[in-house]
């Protein structure tokens, strides 16, 4: 029986299952004994090598010269997907960077399976791009093309929240109407699904899927919102300018967005940033900003902000240490600051959940359970807001990083058996 794969290519983290028809699909280790892999690629200019996942992040943080690329999934459906970036003096297409990462996942999964993998189910968000069906479809076509380019010949797709539902269904003893909340790094996706042991035997579950919905707001957006209220204020965001108005803010939004940071390091962008000095009433802010840009510390800041978000997601407090910019520079961060930073985003996510239930023709009281999956569901304020919108529903916490991959494996096993 030919082996198959199921891959959750995530914005922040990825996971994979393999199966061969003779036994259920199983998660495979992607980095050491870890079953998840941060979706990151580092082009190490000092050693002329490429690293993936935690190793990529570690090499970057260790100070090696080169380019760190994260949030690769966010490029799908964007105008950047057909553009190139300069790596070690050579233009490299963003599409090719995604291809290299997916090829790495494939090779690693094949090593675990002990055979070539040519059939795959890939997860996809309900919407790669909000309110733009053409770009959304282009994103899926691009991902299919990349998968075929790295050697998959039979490529299928399944919505990520549906996959999470299939993983949850294996634990149920009776029919249940579930709102699956899959909130990861790039998108917040919802599905209203009828689940139960009697339904699990059916390959075609289309009649059990009552509605799907999603919005392109999730973990990486939360990172940006938190950065704007913490790290970026240390660099001058919100500070008064010489004319009494606040200093220009656009550069801070770009500096706190993973896939835009690299564009601030070009000669033209640096020259433009230097001209902003005339707007600052406190020159130290502009000096800090320019040091970050000249020394290419943007991704380091973004990584520290992400770490701080995780540290306070369920309460508590930490300190964002920015001493590499200026001695003793830093700012305290706690759960309350995180909550304030992401309030507007949470409101849009909750409204999307309510709209999805409404599209299913149901009242909120008809939802029996909310099944949380995706790394961003670790944020207490987000879980609480969704639970408050569906007061009758039981809140169930799935595996935040592997539920989708496991569910894709269940689906792949039924397709390819």
Image (spheres, helix red, strand yellow):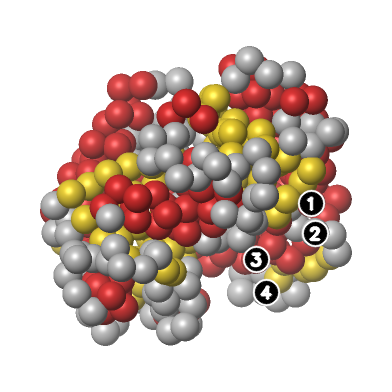
Tell me if residue 125 comes above or below residue 360 in the rendering.
below
Judging by the rendered image, the residue that carries numbered circle 1 is 380
Q: Which mark is residue 314?
A: 2
Q: Considering only order in the chain, which callout, 1 or 3, is on the residue closer to the N terminus?
A: 3
Cα distance, mark 2 to mark 4? 26 Å
The picture quadrant where one finds residue 280 is: top right
Q: Residues within 10 Å of mark 3 (few under 14, many from 20)?
A: some
Tell me if residue 140 comes above or below residue 267 in the rendering.
above
Q: Considering only order in the chain, which callout, 4 or 3, is on the residue closer to the N terminus?
A: 3
Report the side of 290 relative to 271 (left or right). Answer: right
Q: Residues within 10 Å of mark 2 (few under 14, many from 20)?
A: some
At a point 85% along the width and 33% down the height, the residue shown is 391
Q: Considering only order in the chain, which callout, 3 or 2, is on the residue closer to the N terminus?
A: 3
Cα distance, mark 1 to mark 2? 5 Å
Q: Considering only order in the chain, which callout, 1 or 4, is on the residue closer to the N terminus?
A: 4
Q: Nearer the viewer, residue 5 or 150?
A: 5
At a point 23% along the width and 79% down the height, the residue shown is 114
Cα distance, mark 4 to mark 1? 29 Å
Query: Residue 22: image x %, image y %?
Result: 31, 68
Q: Secondary structure at mark 1?
A: helix
Judging by the rendered image, the residue that carries numbered circle 3 is 307
Report the side of 190 relative to 7 (left or right). Answer: right
Tell me if residue 277 comes above or below residue 9 in the rendering.
above
């Amino acid at each position: 029986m030919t082996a198959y794969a199921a891959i959750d290519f995530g914005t922040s983290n990825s996971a994979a299952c393999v199966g061969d028809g003779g036994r259920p699909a199983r998660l495979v280790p992607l980095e050491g004994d870890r079953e998840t892999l941060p979706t990151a690629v580092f082009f190490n200019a000092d050693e002329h090598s490429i690293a993936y996942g935690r190793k990529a992040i570690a090499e970057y943080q260790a100070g090696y010269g080169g380019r760190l690329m994260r949030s690769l999934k966010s490029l799908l459906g964007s105008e950047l997907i057909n553009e190139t970036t300069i790596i070690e003096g050579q233009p490299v297409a963003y599409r090719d960077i995604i291809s290299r990462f997916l090829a790495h996942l494939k090779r690693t999964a094949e090593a675990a399976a002990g055979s070539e993998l040519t059939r795959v189910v890939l997860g996809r968000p309900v919407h790669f791009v909000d309110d733009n069906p053409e770009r959304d479809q282009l994103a899926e076509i691009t991902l299919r093309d990349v998968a075929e380019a790295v050697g998959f010949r039979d490529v299928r797709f399944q919505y990520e929240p549906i996959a999470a539902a299939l993983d949850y269904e294996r634990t149920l003893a009776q029919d249940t109407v579930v709102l699956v909340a899959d909130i990861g790094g790039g998108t917040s996706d919802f599905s209203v699904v009828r689940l139960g042991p009697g339904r699990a035997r059916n390959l075609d579950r289309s009649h059990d899927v009552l509605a799907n919905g999603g919005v392109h707001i999730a973990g990486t957006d939360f990172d940006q919102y938190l950065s704007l209220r913490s790290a970026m204020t240390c660099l001058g965001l919100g500070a008064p300018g010489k004319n009494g108005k606040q200093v220009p803010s656009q550069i801070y939004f770009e500096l706190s967005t993973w896939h835009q940071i690299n564009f601030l390091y070009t000669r033209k962008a640096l020259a433009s940033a230097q001209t902003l000095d005339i707007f600052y009433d406190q020159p130290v802010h502009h000096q800090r900003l320019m040091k970050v840009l000249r020394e290419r510390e943007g991704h380091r800041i973004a990584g520290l902000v992400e770490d701080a978000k995780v540290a306070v997601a369920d309460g508590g407090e930490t300190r964002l240490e920015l001493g590499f910019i200026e001695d003793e520079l830093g700012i305290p961060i706690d759960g309350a600051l995180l909550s304030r930073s992401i309030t507007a985003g949470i409101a849009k996510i909750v409204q999307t959940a309510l709209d999805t239930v409404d599209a299913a023709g149901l009242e909120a009281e008809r939802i029996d359970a909310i099944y949380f999956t995706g790394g961003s569901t670790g944020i207490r304020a987000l879980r609480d807001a969704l639970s408050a919108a569906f007061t009758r529903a039981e809140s169930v916490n799935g595996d935040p990083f592997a539920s989708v991959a496991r569910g894709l494996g269940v689906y792949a096993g039924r397709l390819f058996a």
